Image: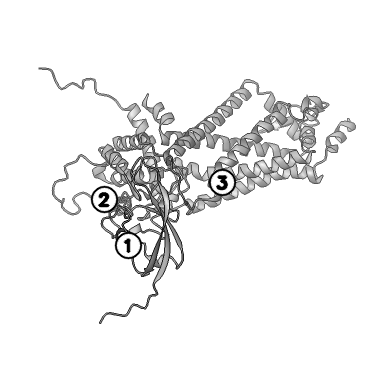
C-alpha cells in the first residue's frame, strides 16, 4: 500500500533569467509555480513549470541537466544568489523544494563569468574548463588494465587527499560563487589530484604551469582568499588545494627556469 | 625569462608579489610601532632613536626606497588583479548575489587599503616631510640635548649631550588637533582590519596554510591585529586624554 502523502502542496514565484541566445540581451521574467510537492527536486519543479509554459505556447526555460544525482556537474545555475541553491555540499539537482517556503520568490540565473558565456536562459558554455583540462589534466604513463593491488604503494593520507581533489565534477560553482570569477578551486583540484599520486609526478611541473597559464588566458579572475568557492562547491572541495597549487606553481616556475637543457635535442640527421 | 614572466604576468605570480611585499610591509609597521612606543619613556629614548635612524644615511635611504618599492608593487599587483577579476565576471552582473562565508575584513580589503594609502601620504607629509602641520615639525622646534647615552644592543650610538631634533615634542604637539588624532586612530583601525585579512591570506598565497592549523593561524593573526591596533591607539589616545603632555619636554629644557 502506498503511503498517503500528507505533505502540504505549496506555491512559489520563479524569477528566471530569460535569454534567447548568446549575443541576445536577457532579462528576468516571473513565472508562478503552483501546487508544488515539497519533495520534488528543483529540476523536477522546473520540468513542471516548463510543461505549463509549453501548454501555454511559451518557450520553455532552457536549463542544463544530466545525471540528476549530483555526480555530473551539468545542472549549474545560481539560485537566490548562491550557486546550486541554499544547500551545503549538493548540486542543483539534489536541492529539494522543501528548502523553500510557500510564497517565496526564487531568483534563478545562470553562472556569471566571462569565460562561461550564456548559451540560452540558464545554460552556460563551460568548455573553458575542458580547455584547462586539456592543457595538463592528464598523465602520459601507460594506463593499461587495472594494476595489481598494492603494486604501487601510496600512503593512505596521500591517496585520501587525492580522492578528495578527484571528487571535483567540474560544475563551475567555484567560478560562479567567487566575486572574481576565479577558477582556482577547480584548477587546484585537478592539479592536486594528479600531483599527489606517483603516476602524476612525471608531468607535475608542466601540468601546473600549463593549466594555470590556460586559466589566465581564458580570462578567469584570481583568488582573494575569501573561500566562497569551497563553501559553494557541491563536493565541498577544500581551498587548501589552492594553497597547494600556489606552492606547486612557484616551485615549478623555479625548476623550469633553472633546469639544465640537453646540448643536442636533434633526432639525428639523415 | 620564464620566472620573471610567471611572477609578474600570471595570476598566481601577482598574488605572490602581493604576499611577499605585504610581508615586508607587515614587518615594517610592527617595527615602526615598537619604535614609536618609546614615546612613553623618557624623551631621551625616542629622540636618540630618531637621531640614530637619521644618522644611518645611505642605509636609511636603502630601506626607504625598498619600502616604497614594496608599497608600489603591492598597489600595482592589487590594481592589476582587481581589474582582471572585474573583467572576469563579464558584462552581466548577478541579479542576486549573497556572501556565503567570506570574512568581514576580506570584503572591505580594497576600501581599507584606500584609507591606509591616504593615511600613509598624510603621515609622510606630517612627520617625515614636514609639509602638513609644519609649525610643529621637528625642524621648527628648539633642539633637544640628550641627557643620557642612546644605546642599541649595548653600544652607545648617540652619546649624551648631543643636540638632536625634538621628536617627542613633535609627536605630542602633532596630535594636539583632535581631528588629526582621530584620523590616525580610524586609519590604524582600518590598517588593522586590512592586516586581519592580509596576514591570514599571505600564508594561503605562499602555500603554507591548511585546515589542520588554519584556525590557530586565524587566532594568532587576530591577536596580532588587536595588539597592533591597541599599540597605535595609545599614542594619539594618550595625547588626547592628556596622559602624554608637551610640558614633559619643556621641563627637560628648563632644567638645563
Residue at point 36% right, 70% down? A37
Q: B83 or B70, which is in the foreground?
A: B83
Which chain contains the residue that carries disc 1? Answer: A
Residue that mark 3 sits on: B196
Q: CA distance from mark 2 to mark 3?
A: 38 Å
Question: Which quadrant of the structure image shows residue B3?
Answer: top left
Give the percent coordinates (x, y) of residue A139: 23, 41
Q: B165 or A231, which is in the foreground?
A: A231
Residue that mark 1 sits on: A52
Same subunit: marks 3 and 1: no
Q: In what quadrant of the picture does the N terminus of chain B appear?
A: top left
Give the percent coordinates (x, y) of residue B146: 79, 29
Same subunit: marks 1 and 2: yes
Q: A262 or A74, which is in the foreground?
A: A74
Which chain contains the residue that carries disc 2? Answer: A
Q: Horizontally, is B222 left or right of B170 in the view?
A: left
Residue that mark 2 sits on: A154
In this view, B253 is above or below A78: above
Front label number (1 vs 2)? 1
Front label number (3 vs 1)? 1
Q: Horizontally, is B62 left or right of B93 in the view?
A: right
Which chain contains the residue that carries disc 3? Answer: B
- The answer, for residue B232, to whether it is visible in the render is yes
Amino acid at each position: 500500500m502506498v503511503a498517503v502523502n500528507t505533505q502540504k502542496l505549496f506555491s512559489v514565484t520563479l524569477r528566471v533569467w530569460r535569454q534567447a541566445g548568446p549575443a541576445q540581451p536577457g532579462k528576468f521574467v516571473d513565472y508562478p509555480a503552483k501546487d508544488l510537492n515539497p519533495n520534488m527536486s528543483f529540476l523536477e519543479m522546473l520540468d513542471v513549470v516548463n510543461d505549463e509554459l509549453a501548454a501555454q505556447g511559451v518557450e520553455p526555460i532552457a536549463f542544463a541537466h544530466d545525471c540528476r544525482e549530483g555526480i555530473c556537474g551539468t545542472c549549474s545555475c545560481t539560485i537566490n544568489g548562491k550557486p546550486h541553491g541554499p544547500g551545503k555540499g549538493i548540486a542543483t539537482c539534489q536541492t529539494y523544494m522543501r528548502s523553500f517556503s510557500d510564497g517565496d520568490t526564487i531568483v534563478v540565473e545562470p553562472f556569471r563569468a566571462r569565460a562561461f558565456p550564456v548559451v540560452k536562459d540558464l545554460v552556460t558554455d563551460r568548455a573553458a574548463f575542458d580547455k584547462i583540462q586539456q592543457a595538463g589534466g592528464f598523465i602520459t604513463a601507460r594506463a593499461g588494465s587495472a594494476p595489481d593491488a598494492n603494486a604501487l604503494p601510496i600512503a593512505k593520507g596521500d591517496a585520501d587527499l587525492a580522492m578528495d581533489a578527484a571528487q571535483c565534477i567540474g560544475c563551475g560553482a567555484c567560478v560562479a560563487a567567487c566575486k572574481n570569477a576565479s577558477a582556482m578551486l577547480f584548477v587546484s583540484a585537478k592539479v592536486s589530484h594528479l600531483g599527489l599520486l606517483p603516476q602524476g609526478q612525471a608531468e607535475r611541473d608542466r601540468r601546473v604551469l600549463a593549466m594555470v597559464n590556460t586559466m589566465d588566458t581564458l580570462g578567469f579572475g584570481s583568488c582573494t582568499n575569501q573561500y566562497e568557492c569551497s563553501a559553494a562547491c557541491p563536493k565541498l572541495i577544500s581551498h587548501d588545494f589552492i594553497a597547494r597549487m600556489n606552492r606547486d606553481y612557484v616551485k615549478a616556475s623555479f625548476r623550469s627556469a633553472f633546469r639544465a637543457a640537453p646540448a643536442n635535442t636533434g633526432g639525428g640527421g639523415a | 625569462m620564464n620566472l620573471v614572466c610567471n611572477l609578474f604576468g600570471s595570476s598566481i605570480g601577482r598574488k605572490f608579489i602581493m604576499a611577499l611585499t605585504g610581508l615586508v610591509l607587515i614587518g615594517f609597521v610592527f617595527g615602526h610601532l615598537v619604535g614609536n612606543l618609546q614615546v612613553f619613556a623618557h624623551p631621551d629614548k625616542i629622540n636618540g632613536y630618531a637621531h640614530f635612524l637619521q644618522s644611518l644615511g645611505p642605509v636609511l635611504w636603502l630601506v626607504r626606497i625598498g619600502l616604497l618599492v614594496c608599497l608600489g608593487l603591492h598597489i600595482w599587483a592589487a590594481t592589476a588583479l582587481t581589474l582582471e577579476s572585474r573583467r572576469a565576471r563579464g558584462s552581466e552582473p548577478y541579479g542576486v548575489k549573497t556572501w556565503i562565508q567570506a570574512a568581514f575584513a576580506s570584503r572591505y580589503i580594497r576600501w581599507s587599503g584606500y584609507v591606509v594609502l591616504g593615511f600613509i601620504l598624510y603621515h609622510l607629509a606630517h612627520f617625515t616631510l614636514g609639509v602638513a602641520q609644519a609649525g610643529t615639525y621637528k625642524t621648527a622646534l628648539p633642539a633637544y640635548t640628550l641627557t643620557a647615552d642612546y644605546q642599541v644592543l649595548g653600544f652607545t650610538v648617540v652619546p649624551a649631550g648631543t643636540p638632536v631634533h625634538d621628536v617627542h615634542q613633535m609627536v605630542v604637539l602633532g596630535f594636539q588637533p583632535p581631528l588629526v588624532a582621530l584620523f590616525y586612530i580610524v586609519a590604524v583601525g582600518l590598517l588593522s582590519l586590512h592586516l586581519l585579512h592580509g596576514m591570514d591570506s599571505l600564508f594561503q598565497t605562499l602555500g603554507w596554510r591548511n585546515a589542520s592549523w588554519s584556525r590557530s593561524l586565524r587566532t594568532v593573526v587576530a591577536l596580532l591585529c588587536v595588539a597592533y591596533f591597541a599599540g597605535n591607539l595609545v599614542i594619539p589616545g594618550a595625547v588626547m586624554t592628556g596622559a602624554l603632555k608637551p610640558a614633559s619636554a619643556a621641563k627637560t629644557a628648563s632644567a638645563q
